[in-house]
Amino acid sequence: MPEQSTHADKSTSEEFGPEASTDRVEEYLESAAELEPELQDAEARAYMRSLELRIETEVARLRSEGKYPPSLARRVRTYYRTLLPDGAASGERDFDAVFKTLDRIAYMDVDVPTASSKPGVAFVKRSLRTLMAWYLNYLAQQFNNFATNLVHLLGIADVRIAALESRFDASAFRATGLLAATAAAKAQAATAGRVAEALSGTRGRVLVAECADGTLLAGLSEAGLNAYGVESRRELLQAAEARNLELREGGTLEHLAGVAPGSLAALVLSGIVDRDTVNDRVAALVHARRVLEEDAALVLVCASADAFDDPANRIEADLSPGRPFAPETWGFLLGKLGFGSITSEPSEDGPYLVLARNARMAPEIGALADSKVVLTALEPPRERRR
Amino acid sequence: MSGIHQFLPMLAKGDGVGNNARAMAKRLAEVGIPSRFYADLDKTGEASGGHFDYAKATEAGDILLYHVATSSPMTTYLARRSEPLGVVYQNITPPEYFATYDARAAAVQKRALGEVETLAERTLLAMTPSAYNAEDLHQAGYREVAEFPIIFDPTDFLGSSSPRVEEVLTGLRTKGFANWLFVGRLVPNKAQERLIMALHAHREAYGDTAVLHLVGRPSYPGYVAALHRLAAELGLADRVNFVMGVSEEELAAFYRGSDLFASASEHEGFCMPIVEALFHGLPVMAYDAGAVPETLGIGGIHLSDRDPATMAAWAEMIATDTGLRGRLRRLGREQLTRVAPTATIPAFDRAIARLIELAGSPMKPDFEAPSAIVGETREILDRLSDQSDKESA
């Protein structure tokens, strides 16, 4: 154990002098004995890593033999979605059901039941009801007035919220998902070599999301990286499948939400960084903070603002909720979210890369990534909670 | 005589919160602290009544311990009382998981999250089984949080086993099927559909050689129906075994007779079934979400995503590689030494000592008193160790 002797030598000769050496060595030996579980952990982790490599090879074999292609996984997931209850996104039907129940029960009935199996009790109950009617009616009237108005108020709020939801329904902006030729696809093709260079030597899983037709992903795989891609557009997914790449079907945010914390050695984001809402872009960065290992690389493959003015991208530009950011904007957002070593690499023909490293995870960011991510990610988390 | 009395919305055997509370009561009794249960729904007959009944038996110097599990009027009741308060928090599933299926359940969960914050100011010490949960508590404003795995009594799930279930599982294995097992309520956050998808991928890749047993009570009919239909559509209707509600003996038999414990759950505050599986020497593979990384530790396979093909490949390797299964069992046993009562009872003792100190209580518990649960656990771990050694030999 070379670290032990280094530590002991340094302690004795430089800090404490020879007379303290025995105590220090004793103390160190005790602490070294406590390190044993840690060493076992390292051994266990190394063993698990060797198993993971076996599994990755096996999964690659299955894919190459066409045993369980991403298109089949996509069909299964799509079918499962059809089984979810209606109103899944907003719980609209549930709201209606609860609202109707509330409307039904928000009424105080003063007509108290008076029947009884015991002789004479029904008469007593009826007498009490008659005697107390003036009092109960007075109370019930006030309660019923209050409850009726409360239910009415909820009804108004429901109508107004429904109107707002329909006006700001983000799904209306997803038309760009139908387009195959996007500024992002061109940016990927133009920067594939530079991305491979930036990530050379990366050990561990690398995700490219979205991966379009797989041009950039293929470059990373050829460079020896353990890379896989995510793509939601069917025709592009099929084109990438034909290249025998490891793929998942789905949207970028949807996939990132399902990736375990600290499990990626690098992440390449494309597409979402050009055309989605600001909230979605920030959400992607927050997810990146969570899923990347410490000091792992984040690469943003960005189209330039000029690309959206290009007639070839007119449809995409018109239908997208967002526009490409300037490198400074990315630098600002990444810095705010705690990324380090942020640089941007412009190119002459438009697309540019933004590179950053994942710093140590702040616990608040981890909690955020598990919940609904919004722009408030940029606010100090403690203040936000209060 | 004053004591530390536990409040919980429901007390039941086989339930994570209930087992935890019962094990705590056992230990408190051993160290000489009286402890009664107050539960609004008592399925054990062990509670002294609902929460209002405490007022009839209150004594000066009492400390109250509340197990936050769901929204309950107990919160308001305890917030208004003056006795020193401790909170045990095993996590509350975020409401968005249920909103699709049951808006009322989602609203209850949301209220429960609010109640966790309500008690923060008044709570002297919170106890929770994972760093994942501790972060929730810190965010909610709790001043002091003791973090240690759930206290439980392993004999709760290591008792006798149902011969009939064991026979069925052995029969399936004889016919060439590997038995995959998941134990947990049928609820959306447990994501049982991902296990069905993995089973489908397994059949596509390796043939019809595995059966999935989903053991757990259903909560939302819509979700259960979706799982049934997914299995049927994928041609797995008779390969996915929905076991809704089992006895302790049947549960033990499922653990003993299975080849693999698989979990795709997205939200776990601790995941007790993983520990139960490890106690039964079952290899575990689990999606690394929530507190699972802490609970599973070095004891099993951590899945970074739930790609069906990857899960299928892992399951196949575990089912067919005897050496790997043995190694995983040994690692599982090693992990148990960190989450079993041998490690957690002393941590619980320390937390109780701290709670008494913070409350300024004159209680003088005898923490030197031996723990029956620790003794039993030690025997079980020794037995597991002997088995591992025999397998290695």
Image (spheres, rainbow, N blue to C red):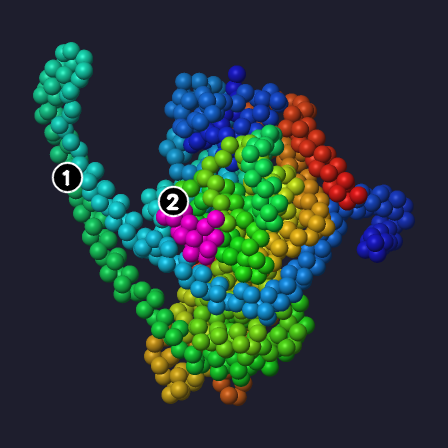
Q: In percent of the image, x 80 and y 43: which residue is there?
A: B393
Helix, strand or loop under label 1: helix
Magenta part of the protein: which range?
B221-238
Identify which residue, B200 or B56, lies in the foreground: B200
x, y percent for residue B6: 49, 28
Which numbered disc covers residue B49? none
Residue that sits furthest to the front in the current view? B175
- Pointer 1 local density, CA inside 10 Å: few below 14, some 14–19, many at least 20: few
x, y percent for residue A224: 66, 74
Location of residue A46 with respect to A136 vertically, above or below? below
Location of residue B264 with respect to A76 vertically, above or below? above
- Pointer 2 local density, CA inside 10 Å: few below 14, some 14–19, many at least 20: some
| Magenta stretch encompasses residue B235 | yes
x, y percent for residue B380: 68, 33
| Magenta stretch encompasses residue B330 | no
Give the residue type that dot 2 points to.
Tyr
Task: Residue under label 1, please give it.
Answer: A145
Identify which residue, B49 or B116, lies in the foreground: B49
Label 1: chain? Answer: A
Task: Residue under label 2, please give it.
Answer: B220
x, y percent for residue A68: 54, 64
